[in-house]
Amino acid sequence: MMSNSTIFKTNFDKTLIWACSVLAILTAIAYLLVAEGFLPIGGANASAGDGSIIFVAAGCYFAGGLMIHLKRRWLWALGLTINLLVISFYFNMYITRPEILLSAGGLTTKFYQILLEGALLILIIRSRAFDRKQARIIR
């Protein structure tokens, strides 16, 4: 198996890593905009309770966006799984509340999260294919 530092040599792969990172950071910024009220979320109050959960989410996406550059497939898979859970919980919680589901804040965050999900999936698949190709070359 090749080391993770040699996995990505093509411009497409490097661009894909940067795209994932930018999407995660854009998601974090969108969450901050929701928290500050610049992106409304329908009838719900973004700062319900003490409002810290939205800042935790933004921090996690920001940290994840930086950790993408570590080029560790298990981190990408963890991010993919957590992101999928966030998207699933959102749609399950607000399926009966279109004023939240289709709000500017909801659509913006989910738009970036769904794009991030797809990009991470492609990144994981491509890195796995690279590992298999290198294993065949070594044998």
Image: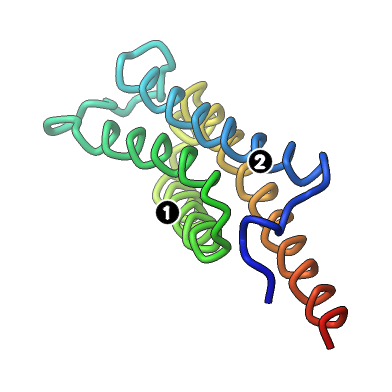
Residue 95 is at least partly visible in this image:
no
Residue 4: % across, % down: 62, 61
Above-or-below relation of 8 to 133: above
Residue 113 shows up from this direction = yes
At x 72%, y 62%, the residue is 127
**How far is mark 2 from mark 1, CA to CA?**
17 Å
**Mark 2–mark 1 CB contact (< 8 Å):** no
Local SS, label 2:
helix
The residue identified by callout 2 is 115
Check the image and name the residue furthest to the top. 38
Name the spot of residue 96 as percent of width and height, x first.
Answer: 46, 45
Q: Name the residue under label 1.
A: 89
**Please, what is the three-letter code of the amino acid marked with disc 1?**
Phe
- Quadrant for the C terminus, please: bottom right
Q: Residue at x 31, y 22 (%)?
A: 35
Q: What residue type is labelled 2?
A: Leu
